[in-house]
Amino acid sequence: MENSTVVNASTQNQTDFFGDFLTWTFTEKDPRYLQPFWDLRLGYEQYLESPLFPVFISVVFYFGLCLPFCLSDIFCTNQGWYKKYKIQPDKEVTKAHYYDTLTLTFWNHILFIMPAAVGQWIWTPSTPLPDLAPTLFDFLWHQLAGLFIFDFQYFVWHMSHHKIRFLYRHIHSVHHRYNSPFVWVTQYLHPWELVVVGFLTTTNTWFFNSHPLTVWSYMIVSIVVSVEAHIGFDFPFLLHNLDLTGNIGGSPKHDMHHQKPLTNYQPFFNHFDKLFGSFCPPMSAGGKKSKELQEYEQIAKDCKKNL
Ligand SMILES: [Zn+2]
Ligand SMILES: [Zn+2]
């Protein structure tokens, strides 16, 4: 009798907690933890509401994030940690590689990103800036949902641009000029690929009518994901090394896509690659091959022999 009372009380507590959580979430009783951060906008509204602001933060954040990795490839190649964490330690990043990738990046920005920004400036209305910050729940789930949607969209786009010869040859092959990624390969893209990726990233948060703070944060998260995929390093603090479920691909997985282009199409997660049989176990820091990767390569070799 006593036991059943204890169990009932505990179930009641759980129900109350869950009910409170839902009430808190859906009736917008969130105490707006992000309000102090959102209030930092005060006094700068005329810049932040400009349609040029998202483009400005994307470009500045992209180059700012790439810079430390670029400097590592130039100045740190003789340091112990460099080869220890490099995924393909025997591949060198040369001056010619820099010249080539930065030249294309420069022209892509001048010929496509800048005109798109000017068009946005002329034709897009100013962003209304609400007084209240987004709720923490909306801020997080809109971005996570945006990432899942982008991950699926890019998986379909990416796979089709490998499977359809015409699309690969004329568009996506540009990005595959390097089989050992380094940071400037991130935007080493055919202009059409750059436009598609930019369009998908910009419009995904429109589905949820997201708060401007959520939109800007999502754009930064998308840049982090795409740059991380191409850094060519497998540092222990990266998200995929902290993920116990094995569902986040990270830099090793995309690095393997550049080595074996018919594998690992998903940019961030692994589930569709596993479902459609395109997953290849990645190589980790220092070029280490896991047992799964050795088995994968052995099976691929045997299949070739039997053809
Ligand atoms: Zn890539
Ligand atoms: Zn590809």
Image (tube, helix red, strand yellow):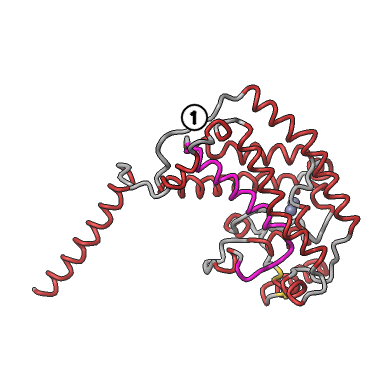
Q: Tell me: 240 left or right of 99.
A: left
Q: Position of residue 302 (x, y in %)?
A: 78, 71
Q: State yes or no: residue 72 in magenta.
A: no
- The one nearer the camera, 288 or 71, is 71
Q: Position of residue 170 (x, y in %)?
A: 83, 41
User: What residue is disc 1 on?
Assistant: 128
- The one nearer the camera, 232 or 41, is 41
Residue most extreme to the front: 43
Can I make out residue 170 in this image? Answer: yes
Residue 116, compared with residue 8, is above or below; it is above
User: Which range of residues does the magenta coloring cover?
Assistant: 210-237
Q: Position of residue 275 (x, y in %)?
A: 59, 57
Residue most extreme to the right: 96
Residue 164, compared with residue 248, is above or below; it is above
Look at 63% across and 42% down and name the residue there.
57
Q: Tell me: 136 left or right of 77.
A: left
Q: State yes or no: residue 232 in magenta.
A: yes
Q: Quadrant of the C terminus?
A: bottom right
